Image (tube, rainbow, N blue to C red):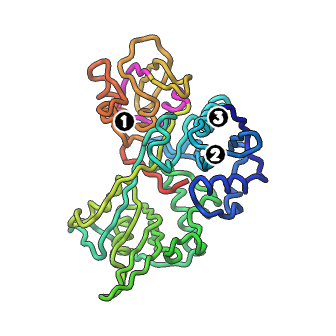
Amino acid sequence: MAFTTRSFAITELGDFQRLSDAAFLQDTTEPERWLPLFEAPRSTAVLDGDELIGGATICSRRLTLPGAGQHPVAAVTGVAVKPGHRRRGVLTELMRVQLHGLREGGREAIAALWASEAGIYGRFGYGHAADFQALSLPRGAAFAPHVGVGDARVRELPRAEAMPFMVELRQELAPRRTGWLSRSAANWQIHFADEPSDRDGLSAYRYAVHPDGYAVYRVKHDWGHSGPRHEAHVRELVARTDEAYAALYRYLLDLDMVGSVEQYAGSGEPVTRLLADPRAASRRLVDSLWVRLVDVERALPLRRYAVDVDVVLEVVDGFCPWNAGRWRFAVRDGVASVARTEADAEVVASARALGAAFLGGVRLSALGAAQEVREVTPGALSRLTLAFLGVEEPHCAEVF
């Protein structure tokens, strides 16, 4: 179909919000709270004549990459197609304008998003790069004998007193935690928005602070015939040390009147390994961050790699054709170089597979078994898999 595209004006934020609410089947919300995050020049509107039928935007953030600190990422959000106009190519046009625009403008070499439905974005080269786990821990769950919590106290503080400490601690730790995003003051405000409409029937936030960490949680009240069985819903738990990490969970698990601690935690969170009985925890994995290498040549050298390797990698990328072809991918002392080559391919990988493996939490060999990667030269895929592995599982703690 023939559409026109342009960026939104800042005065059209309300129109963008109404489009998004309609697409996500939500009641209309006030757009003013999003104004500090809305980068109008980085937004895309799709119109059929004068009718707004699609929209998306990019937020300028920084993402922690394996061994390399934080680097610019195009944080894609607000992707919406008006009901009644789906299956007409609107989403494809939005993705084309975004990704091609990033390339043509020399902007971020990496894009990332959270997908409302997991089957949508793979066809545009986004790879499923990280998971989170829906975690439920029973009150009073015992720790294994070796686990130490130290002597420091965990205290509950008012928001105004806790927030400066939280901001400072997270800013210190974020460059070392793969998958974490940078946060501006506006991002902090949105992430911990606490109006009654934000609570979904739960309490206001409570702030538990340790000298080396913090936990922010809400309470879902449940008064049964046998007494209270409230749920403590953890929004975020951050710790500088292993003892602080254990102490904060011990505090949450020992809360009076609470029946369980509920959390969307990173897939690699070690909390279940603190437990004397790991089966006491209920866990369910769900996809979180999806990553797209907009420019393979610029993106791959941004992170550090686990072992040296020298492989000719053929990239299959129909949506961003500048990435397609054969590249010599060489790593020495953790640092990668990428250059075009006419040599025969040793490994063939889709753009989606490279996006999935880029943060170090997904094995390229597993993607080979899923037929997204093909080994041509025996042993080459094993070497490449080891190089891409990260020290820790990537985790993005916030939906954007």
Pick whichever of labels 3 and 1 is earlier in the sequence: 3
The residue beneath circle 3 is: 97
- Residue 130, percent from left and from top: 41, 47
- Residue 210, percent from left and from top: 44, 71
The residue beneath circle 2 is: 56
Q: Amino acid at mark 3?
A: Val
Residue appearing at x 34%, y 24% in the figure = 374
The CA distance from mark 3 to mark 2 is 10 Å
Along the line of sight, which residue is nearer the eye, 163 or 28? 28
Residue appearing at x 71%, y 46% in the figure = 52
Q: Amino acid at mark 1?
A: Ala
Pick whichever of labels 1 and 2 is earlier in the sequence: 2
Disc 1 crowd rating (10 Å Cα; few below 14, some 14-19, many 20+) is many
| 305 inside magenta stretch | yes
Q: Element under label 1? A: loop
Direction from residue 45 to residue 96 in the image, left or right: left
Query: Against 316, is 212 above or below?
Result: below
Residue appearing at x 58%, y 61% in the figure = 26
Residue 20 shows in this picture: yes
Along the line of sight, which residue is nearer the eye, 258 or 245? 258
- Residue 297, percent from left and from top: 53, 26
The CA distance from mark 3 to mark 1 is 35 Å
Direction from residue 258 to residue 235 in the image, left or right: right
The residue beneath circle 1 is: 306
Residues shaded magenta: 295-314
